[in-house]
Amino acid sequence: MKSLYCDICKKEISEPVAGRNYFHIREFDICEPCKDAVDARLRPVLRGHYPFSTDWYEQEVISFIEKGCASGRA
């Protein structure tokens, strides 16, 4: 059996089910608590940005995930 670890908090994801308790975003595997934390940090940035662009959104999400991976927390 293959072990899957969150790229942000480095904890093992037990019984991984894609879209339920872990999320694969580009090259990152993220557990549900870290995904919720990234979404919570991203929400105020999204509300303050106008007009909305999917390219800008993807860039922001990836930058927040990369910062989380570098610091070890979301």
Image (spheres, rainbow, N blue to C red):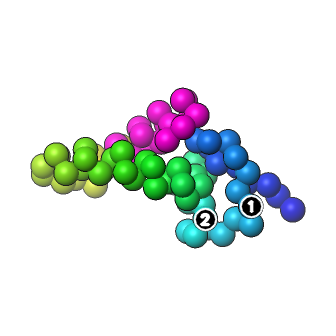
Q: Within the magenta stretch, is there residue 62?
A: yes
Residue lying at the far right in this picture: please name it: 1
What is the magenta range? 60-74
Q: Amino acid at mark 2?
A: Asn
The image position of residue 56, as x and y in percent, is 27, 46
Query: Residue 57, which numbered label?
Result: none
What secondary structure predominates along the stretch shown in magenta? helix
Q: Is residue 52 above or below residue 9?
A: below
- What residue is rendered at 19% in x and 51% in y? 47
Tell me if I can see residue 50 in this picture: yes
The image position of residue 34, as x and y in percent, is 53, 50
Could you say which is closer to the camera, residue 5 or residue 34?
34
Q: How many marks?
A: 2
Could you say which is closer to the camera, residue 56 or residue 35?
35
Residue position marked by numbered label 2 in the rendering: 21
The image position of residue 55, as x and y in percent, is 30, 49
Q: Secondary structure at mark 1?
A: loop
Within 10 angstroms of label 1, few (less than 14), some, or many (20 or more) residues? few
Q: Is residue 16 above or below residue 6?
A: below
- What residue is rendered at 58% in x and 41% in y? 8
Could you say which is closer to the camera, residue 33 or residue 69?
33
Tell me if I can see residue 24 in this picture: no
Residue position marked by numbered label 1 in the rendering: 14
Within 10 angstroms of label 2, few (less than 14), some, or many (20 or more) residues? some
Distance in Å between CA atoms under marks 1 and 2: 9 Å
Q: Amino acid at mark 1?
A: Ser
Q: Decide: marks 1, 2 in contact (CB < 8 A)? A: yes
Q: Is residue 48 above or below residue 22?
A: above
Quadrant location, the N terminus: bottom right
Q: Earlier in the sequence, mark 1 or mark 2?
A: 1
Query: In the visual, does 8 lie left or right of 53?
Result: right
Residue lying at the far left in this picture: please name it: 50
